[in-house]
Image (cartoon, rainbow, N blue to C red):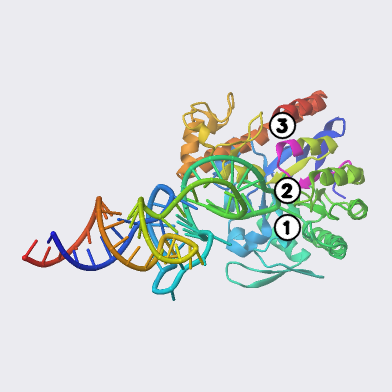
Amino acid sequence: MPMTSPFQVTSTSGNARAGTLSTMTRKVSTPVFMPVATLGAVKTLSPKEVHDLGCEMVISNSFVLSLQPGNEAIGQAGGLHGFSQLDTAIFTDSGGFQVIRDEFKPVVKEEGVLFTSPYDGSKTLLTPEMVVETNRVLAPDVMMVLDDCPPHSCDEKRLNGAVERTLVWAHESLKAHRKVHGDGPDRQLLFAITQGGIDVDLRSSCTKDLAEMNFDGYGIGGLSIGEPLEKMYEVMSKTMHLLPEDKPRYLMGVGDPVQMLECISMGIDVFDSVFPTRNARHGTVFTPNGPINIKATHFKGVLGPIQEGCTCPACQGFSRSFLLHLFKTHETLGWRLATLHNLHFVLSLMRDIRTHIEKGTFLEFKEDFVSKYQS
RNA sequence: GCCCGGAUGGUGAAGCCUGGUAUCAUGCGGGACUGUGGAUCCUUCGUCUCGAGUUCAAAUCUCGGUCCGGGCC
């Protein structure tokens, strides 16, 4: 058992929580949104820009980085912080999510996942122990265990197998992690991941078993991958109480502003998603009145910013008309400005949410935001 | 004046010889994106140079015109 808990809930409003996650390099306020920096960079932005947006934490991918540039290159820089110059806390995902992507030709086996590198065709059997070893070298603040994330459309047998493997691998991850890092303060943290799809019984049993293993935090995986939104809310609302109250809860892969609000109201503390950044690169920018497609022709000649009153770098003098022009001509500044705006939007939303949880006015804030956003 | 070649969505091309629902790319317009696919994916609209002839049926074959390119006198 750690001497002091790395996570403290400091106030609540209904089921919503505000807290502090203390990692070996940073103290991070929750609820928190992590931009995705799979390869060690938030696409189109410099580390300073990410930091200046008020971003406290990002997530990289230890498996993808172990293929390119490889552990050694990152180890020579003393780990991911030194290598990437990211001035935030860093999570790493393990490779479990790559199970539902074709890019690495995944083959799930009992002992791990067999991947084929798209860089040189080499094959890697990724095991829970290997993930721990890679993360010893990369030295992120928090590492996620290897899990088996099956596609939403899989059959019952596949889903059951995924839960079984995820539990076995979680146990092996914990054992390997304790061996390397012990359980003292200022160590790298280890989060488990629940699976079970939208099957409430299966998700419940997986969650219970993992909760007993005393991880530093709990990811909820295998959601927001194509299932109906109502099903995601249902399985979360029915299984949230099975997670330890004194541990951070991390809903993996959700980044829509309204969905994050709903999930915070159920008790989620941490999010990550490519949603704001990928949407930005594809021309969709967030505003309090809902998302707009900046590539739409009717913005030609519109001199106002993306969002009136917004303090992000993209809304200081740059017009919608200019943004439209940049996207039409594929100028990379368009991607950058849209990314800066969307990240500012979700990060400042998180700060507002935290303030309202502390004041006890979270529910009113949420209803007000949602009604404007969806009008 | 004569001979030859060409003309197909906004742009660029295929189809013509051997007649049968005009195809593709790109652009334009709209939508999507959730533990990254860094120009992605889905989708609406939009064309046979003109006229006559042959034919059940013409972008396609025949004749003539217009325009463009090349050549000859």
Nearer the camera: disc 1 or disc 3: 3
Q: Is residue A31 visible?
A: no
Say whether disc 1 or disc 3 marks the residue closer to the N-terminus: 1
Q: Which residues are magenta?
A: A245-259
> Residue visible at 71% across and 27% down?
A372
Residue type, mark 2 in image: Gly
Please give left or right for residue A298 compared with residue A258 in the image.
Answer: left
Residue A321 in sight here: yes
Q: Secondary structure at mark 1?
A: helix
Q: Which residue is mark 3?
A: A374
The chain letter for the residue carrying disc 2 is A
- Element class at badge 2: loop
Q: Residues within 10 Å of mark 3 (few under 14, many from 20)?
A: few
In the rendered structure, does residue A252 fall within the stretch colored magenta? yes
Q: Amino acid at mark 1?
A: Phe
Image quarter where the C terminus of chain A lies is top right
User: Going by the image, does A40 lie left or right of B19?
Assistant: right
Question: Which residue is label 2 attached to?
Answer: A253
Image coordinates of residue B55 in percent, x first then y, are 46, 66
Q: Nearer the viewer, residue A58 or B2?
A: B2
- Relative image position of residue B41 (x, y in whole percent): 60, 55
Same chain assignment for discs 2 and 3 = yes
